Amino acid sequence: MLIFKLHNEQSIARDISDGSVYLYRLSGEPVATFTINENEIAWLFVLPDFQGRGIGTEILDFAERQIFEKHDDVVLHASLSAKIIYLKRGYREIEYRTKKPKTPITYALT
């Protein structure tokens, strides 16, 4: 499946075995994936052909509801290119890593 080729297969496989990965399907086809670990949202990815349709917003709404049932804040790991999306949603930047290429920025929503 394309979604697994575009995303790190080992990380997704680990999260699946941990029971923390979610797939978003349209007409039975997986078009997005994300992981919830404790109060963290990670690996949120929507296939490019399905971006701009509100899927990411729907995923964040769901994930935030799940996390806020048990925690007081949400931590999100995101790429620099997605920064503006999360800042507009009310997240604030709390950490920025530059050690490795494509290392995510960490945001929190309280």
Image (cartoon, rainbow, N blue to C red):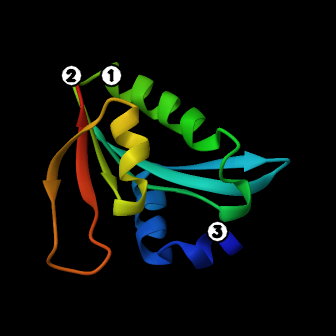
Q: Is the Cβ of the residue at disc 3 closer than 8 Å to that at disc 2?
A: no
Label 1: which residue? 68
53 or 63, which lies in front?
A: 53
Residue 2 x, y percent position in the rendering = 69, 74
Numbered badge on residue 3: 3
Could you tell me the amino acid type at mark 1? Phe
Numbered badge on residue 72: 2
Q: Is residue 79 visible?
A: no
Could you tell me the amino acid type at mark 2? Asp
Picture quadrant of residue 56? top right
**Separation (CA) of disc 3 from disc 1:** 28 Å
**Separation (CA) of disc 2 from disc 1:** 6 Å
Q: Is residue 2 toward the left or the right of residue 76 in the image?
A: right
Identify the image quadrant of the N terminus.
bottom right
**Separation (CA) of disc 3 from disc 2:** 31 Å
Q: Is residue 61 toward the left or the right of residue 58 in the image?
A: left
